[in-house]
Image (tube, rainbow, N blue to C red):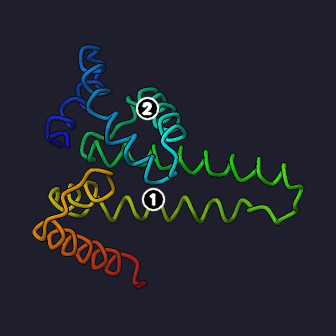
């Protein structure tokens, strides 16, 4: 996995307009974004398309990157939104193909989803970098399977739950 500090430096440099940082930033983000999208979608071809589209969006939004936020978390949030869009498109195509009529999600549901994602990102931002790295690594296809990593992941998730409960008061 890419060194988070180096990734943060590349993202900050690219956000500040350094064109020389764009290629290394893309190279550093490609593998984790594709791996995450593959786990999310379950289809390697769709995942590559989603990751590519997400990175296009990310590079278009670089000026909005908050320098104090984690670069990988920000990138994976954009990939998540793109993967959700891909899933929704696939579901719509299946609906059209089967001509089944199901109730569509209304704007309130979409706003609730966005609020939940924002709350989750805010909660993740409160975790130590090591916990974020552990959780992000657990989402990748190639991840350590040793007992040390599993225990570190268990503790990171426990801290994530505790932080969520302290912020939102729900289990």
At x 51%, y 32%, the residue is 53
Where residue 102 sits in the image (x, y, percent)? Answer: 83, 65
At x 24%, y 14%, the residue is 20
**Can you say which quadrant of the picture contains the N terminus?**
top left
Q: Which residue is mark 1?
A: 118
The image quarter in which residue 159 lies: bottom left
Dot 2: what SS? helix
Against 155, residue 169 (above or below) is below
Where residue 45 sits in the image (x, y, percent)? Answer: 52, 37
Q: Going by the picture, which residue comes out furthest to the top? A: 20
Label whose residue precedes the other's in the sequence (1 or 2): 2
At x 24%, y 20%, the residue is 21
At x 29%, y 19%, the residue is 23
Q: Residues within 10 Å of mark 2 (few under 14, many from 20)?
A: many
Where residue 79 sits in the image (x, y, percent)? Answer: 45, 44
Q: Residues within 10 Å of mark 1 (few under 14, many from 20)?
A: few
Spatial separation of the CA atoms under disc 1 and disc 2:
20 Å
Image side of residue 168 versus residue 53, left or right = left
Q: Which residue is mark 2?
A: 55
**Can you say which quadrant of the picture contains the C terminus?**
bottom left
Nearest-to-viewer mark from 1 and 2: 2
């Amino acid at each position: 996995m890419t060194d988070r500090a180096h990734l943060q430096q590349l993202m900050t440099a690219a956000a500040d307009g350094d064109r020389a940082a764009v290629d290394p930033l893309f190279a550093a983000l490609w593998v984790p974004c594709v791996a995450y999208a593959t786990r999310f979608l379950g289809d390697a071809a769709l995942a590559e398309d989603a990751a590519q589209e997400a990175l296009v969006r990310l590079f278009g939004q670089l000026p909005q990157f908050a320098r104090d936020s984690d670069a990988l978390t920000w990138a994976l949030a954009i990939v998540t939104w793109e993967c959700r869009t891909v899933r929704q498109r696939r579901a719509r195509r299946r609906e059209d193909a089967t001509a089944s009529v199901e109730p569509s999600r209304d704007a309130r549901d979409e706003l609730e989803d966005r609020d939940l994602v924002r709350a989750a990102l805010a909660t993740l931002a409160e975790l130590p970098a090591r916990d974020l790295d552990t959780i992000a690594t657990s989402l990748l296809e190639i991840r350590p399977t040793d007992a040390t990593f599993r225990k570190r992941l268990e503790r990171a998730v426990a801290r994530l739950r505790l932080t969520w409960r302290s912020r939102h008061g729900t289990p």
